[in-house]
Amino acid sequence: MAKAPIDWSPSNWPQLLYRFFTSFRLATVIFVLMTVVTLLGTLGQVDNGLHAAKVKYFHSFFFTEKVFGIPLLLPGGLLLMIFLFINMTLGALVKVRKRWKGAGLLISHFGMLMLLAGGFITWAFSTDGYMALYPGMSTNRVESYREWQLEVMPLSKEGVAEKAWIYPAEYLDTMRSDEQRVIKAESLPFDVVINGYSKNATPIPVSAPMAVGVTGKELEGFKLSPQKPSKEAEQNLPGCFVEFRPRDGGAPIEAILWAGSYRFDPREKPMPFTFTVNDELYGAMLVKKSWTVPFTLRLDEFIFERHPGVMTARNYESRVTRFEDSEPDKPLEIKMNEPMRHAGYTFFQESFGPSGSQPGDEMFSQFAVANNPADQWPLWALVINGIGLGIHFVIMLVNFTVRSRNKKLSPAALS
Amino acid sequence: MMPRFFTSFLPALPALLLFASCGESDVTPGLIERSLSDSEKSFKLAESSTERFRYQTTPAAGSAGSAAGTGENEGGPRLIYDTPAGWVEKPGSTMRDINFTIGENAEAECYVARLPGAGGGLLANVNRWRSQMGAEALTEEQVAALPTKPLFGQQASFVAVDGSYTPGMGTTDTFENYRLLGLILSSDAGAVFVKMTGPKDLLSKNEAAFDQFTQSIDVNLN
């Protein structure tokens, strides 16, 4: 029998869309593509590093990949998981016939949806950064590992600033090296022009042999040499050219900004490019994106033990005090594998510094600070999934047992 | 007739394009004002870009004529090394941590330079040196296969080229029958260059001294 032709009229589009998204074939194609993306992402990690591979293959709607020299446009993990979520919601929860026999699978699918939703929330809302403190230091500020923003601040003669104007990391990171952006701030007497942004760069003195091959502008005896981004994204030090254009028509001021002027050690003071407009001193620099947590942490003591006779760390842990308006001061210990969880944040004992420190040197402690609203969702999703599969197993077992018994008792079996 | 999957897929294209465009934005906001917390308020007013970019602000001070030298600098750890016999130490410069001349008339030179970051990368620097000697550029695979020698406890790529030496750097002079011996240690954490150039005969006599010198360089953390 010939199939009925598909009705393409706009009034039927919702029905077509529903059919598409509830299709079992769509689920099959998504799973095949997810296998391909996972394989490419795993291999891509070798060349691109963990973070870059995550962004390219799993946090994207589409990506291009050369297969046998031919560039292919493929759907990214984010798009596939959104489609899978819609497919599973409509197909396995809405469209499916509701009956007690399928209760276990229904619950199990709900667990899988929760896992996907948790992944989306983690992608969209989680933050990760670090906090580094020497004993006696306290802060409520967490810095990003990888994201840099441009800051302009009015400075006193002593190098103190009360406020800053920022060009956020989310926008700076989207700049191409051949792009120029003019950024205005009404409360500053100049516009800021950014160009030549490079995610990883090194300023090289023009007197250096390696400056010969570096194209681009020379400013104050330096050229900015773009570098191949590191596989470890946190090691990248971006750089760019900036121009400050006074609105009163004064001569523009040009400079190279480089992330290496920021601090590598919690006690170091950042070194901005300084300039004067209308007799006011200003500073400008690339600064790590930072945010605050709703409490302050003070490092009271950092305990660091080495293996005998070698420099390798055997154990390190931090004794801290947590200060919060609504609660009494609380002394705590943060150890490896024993993080501090509070107010939605998790503080892990991550590392220490400065690098190359010798026995007896004062050292700082570094905490990884994670905030993920869906932190526990994978656990609960798997529990729900397990319960669903368990119920399904029991229902199937009971059905099988009853069927087998009925079969034995049937007249045909008795005859 | 198109397969059913594709006929079902077509109506979803507008939705797909909508999703795909979500990540792109041409909107550039102005600068956003924010207050600085106590731990962020204090800045160092660097005197120059040299300081701001963490290059040493004073020339390395070697111990000329001594058997063991120390290249000192304010911003970084000091270097210690053995000075080979017959090598004359010269003051360092912004770009040279250690600087030697070799030969009765200082016909050859040897220096150590350090740079933050990869310093342009291994491939570019090897080929820059080779081009100074009039030699052909190497491929990435050939550079990766270069022999290595120890430097700062790691394996540095060893470059040895004979030819006509054109130092560049504003001069067009060419020196015939020259040799270049060099070590490059390049990583994202920093790059170290040891380069010796001079007449081929003189450098042949100093190859062992070059190895002795490069193996003796160390960081004095005390």
Image: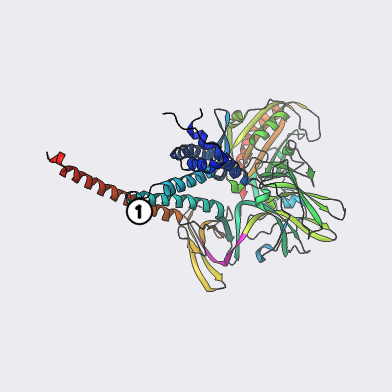
B169 or A152, which is in the foreground?
A: A152
Residue, disc 1: A387
Question: Quadrant location of residue A189?
Answer: bottom right
Residue A301 highlighted magenta (yes or no): yes
Give the x, y percent position of residue A28. Answer: 44, 38
The quarter of the rendered structure image containing the C terminus of chain B is bottom right
Residue B164 position (above or below residue B79): above
Segment tinted magenta in the rendering: A291-303
Residue B45 placement (x, y as % from top left): 75, 58
- Residue A14 placement, left or right of A288: left
Residue A370 as seen in the image, left or right of residue A246? left
**Element class at badge 1:** helix
Q: Which residue is at a point 75% across and 37% down the rendered structure image?
A: A215
Residue type at mark 1: give it. Ile
Report which quarter residue A297 is drawn in.
Answer: bottom right
Q: Is residue A398 or residue B39 the one in the foreground?
A: A398
Q: Is residue A285 magenta?
A: no
Report the chain holding disc 1. Answer: A
